[in-house]
Image (tube, helix red, strand yellow):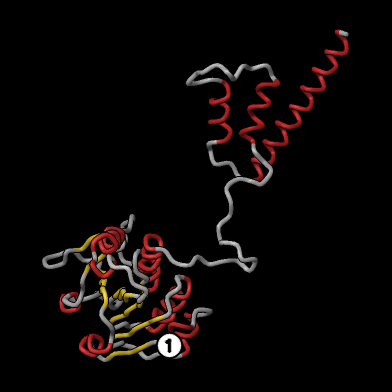
Amino acid sequence: MKRPFEVRIVLVRTIYERNIGATSRAMSNMGCDNLILVNPACEITYEAQQAAATGQTGLQNRTTYASWDEFLEKEPESIKICFTARDGKGRQVRDIDEVLNDISDHAPQFQIESETPFVVHLVFGPEDWGLSADDLEHANFCACLPTFGENWSLNLAQATLLGMFSLRKLWGGNRTRLDGEKLRRAPQGIKGIDPDVTLKTWLEEMGFDLTRQRKINVYTVLRRMLLQNTPTKKELVILETVLQQSIRKLREWKSFQKKDLQ
């Protein structure tokens, strides 16, 4: 992205305050602080605070507008992505990933280099019927969150979380870091353990010639059987231990053979 962006979550005519609280918590997971309520159909009480748990920032700093007119008057220029699960006449709905890629590749707001963040509103409708046709009149893009089961209806807070995650996945952001300042991402494999190398050494000590160029040989077959089935860390450690022990025993046996021949 040539230009920084600011994500604001917009909940329209929300019915249940607990979903507003849970959305605030989801926002804290995704690095979004600005929560906007348009004509909410509920009051914000202790139930919303409970649902927000450790993610109170969005809830406590929320902005409430009585109508779309007030929203449009007071909110800055933005790209508004409205989420809907209904696809019908006048609703050109695409998967969120497709919409986000389209925006980053073609939206003029992001084609210019600027240090000024541009606002992106992610808009979600009420829990009963979602956004209406009148709501979608304000959308720059209509997006849906793909589902893979028979139930295509998502809880509001879950929908906001998935929408923000899709955006972060494609557009980036500052990944959460652990207390030790390390990224919350574990390295592949186990440090100091390399069954792939040990397997080759073991086969060579067993007397197999691995230098010959073959599409399939004993090494490729065993490697596929032992290492390409996503073994657990414990299984990798056990495999490494068995192979290393076998290598030591083979080398000891070869050493005794040499002494006997002398």
The spot of residue 243 in percent (x, y) is 70, 31
Instruction: Tell me if I can see residue 88 in this picture.
Output: yes
As drawn, the residue found furthest toward the top would be 261
**Residue, x 29% and y 90% (percent of image)?**
65
Residue 201 position within the rendered picture, expressed as x and y whole percent measured from the top left: 67, 27
Lateral position of residue 130 relative to residue 156, left or right: left
Compared with residue 190, is residue 59 higher up or lower down, i.e. above or below?
A: below
Q: Is residue 48 left or right of residue 68?
A: right
Q: Which residue is mark 1?
A: 61
Determine the secondary structure under disc 1. Answer: loop
Q: Residue 247's x, y, as percent?
A: 74, 27
Query: Taking 198 as reference, is 79 above or below it?
Result: below
Residue 210, compared with residue 85, is above or below; it is: above
**Whole-percent x and y of residue 101?**
29, 59
- Quadrant hosting residue 150: bottom left
Residue at 28 percent of width and 68 percent of height: 112
Amino acid type shown at disc 1:
Asn
Identity of the residue drawn at 41% across and 76% down: 23
Question: Is residue 155 visible to the viewer in this orientation of the structure?
Answer: no
Q: Quadrant of the C terminus?
A: top right
Of 142 and 234, nearer the camera is 142
Q: Quadrant of the N terminus?
A: bottom left
